Amino acid sequence: MTKNRKNITRRQFGTGLAAFGAMVPVFSPAMLRAQIAPATGELEPQYVSSSFATKRWQDYFSSRRNGAIVSDTVERVLHYWSEDGETYMIFPTSVPISEELTRRGRTNIVRKVNGPEWRPTPNMLKRDPDLPRYVGPGPQNPLGTHALYLSWQYYRVHGTNDTRKIGRQASNGCIGLYNEDIKVLFDLTKVGTQVILI
């Protein structure tokens, strides 16, 4: 008695995987991670969402010195490459609520804070005078659990305790990540990591 066995090609497997991926929520942080294979230098997806296109660091930077970040404010996603080329990760983000608040260009990480404090900017207070003047570290902090301070005054890549903001235009200028994702990015980056917002 022989068993019927169906051979599945890579294309069939990929098609089935894509169909399965369509059933999974788009903004699951675990879906948006990838690893660079050290031997080949090629991208090895690890739960990469088909909703976001991968990018090449060479299109934005002359080197990966200190690591590199591209924050795409249109796709609402952040790309990270390690200096050694072994890690490439993609994270869903929140982005500024308007074009007026969106800053684009080159900057870098100048400070890293675990448990940041928050104070509204002067422009935020003009728009909403009822904002609290200070929020310490903790569950009410708009910066979440970790913050990467950029060389531009008032601009940060940070976590958020309000997960509804991820994937939306929801910030006053900063780039927000899930707290579990900013923790990963915080551990990977260093002062001096290159950043470009596009």
Image: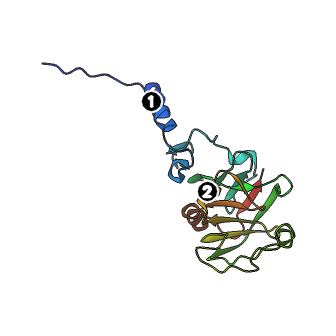
Q: Position of residue 36 (x, y in %)?
A: 55, 48
Residue shown at the point (58%, 52%) measured from the top left: 89
Residue 29 seen anywhere in this rendered image of the structure: yes
Total label count?
A: 2
Residue shown at the point (69%, 56%) measured from the top left: 69
Q: Is residue 110 above or below residue 11?
A: below
**Residue 113 or residue 86, whichever sits in front:** 113
Q: Position of residue 194 (x, y in %)?
A: 73, 60
Q: Which mark is in front, 1 or 2?
A: 2
Residue 64 seen anywhere in this rendered image of the structure: no
**In the rendered image, which quarter is residue 141 located in?**
bottom right
Kind of residue sitting beneath label 2 = Arg
Residue shown at the point (67%, 60%) measured from the top left: 176
In terms of secondary structure, where does tag 1 sit? helix
Q: Answer whether labels 1 and 2 touch (C-beta < 8 Å).
A: no
Kind of residue sitting beneath label 1 = Gly
Residue at numbered disc 1: 16
Q: Position of residue 18 (x, y in %)?
A: 50, 33
**Furthest residue in direction left, as rendered:** 1
Q: Position of residue 16 (x, y in %)?
A: 44, 30
**Residue 62 or residue 173, whichever sits in front:** 173
**In the rendered image, which quarter is residue 191 located in?**
bottom right
Residue shown at the point (48%, 31%) measured from the top left: 19
**Residue 137 or residue 112, whichever sits in front:** 137
**Furthest residue in direction front, as rendered:** 130
Residue at numbered disc 2: 164
Q: Is residue 130 above or below residue 78?
A: below
Q: Earlier in the sequence, mark 1 or mark 2?
A: 1
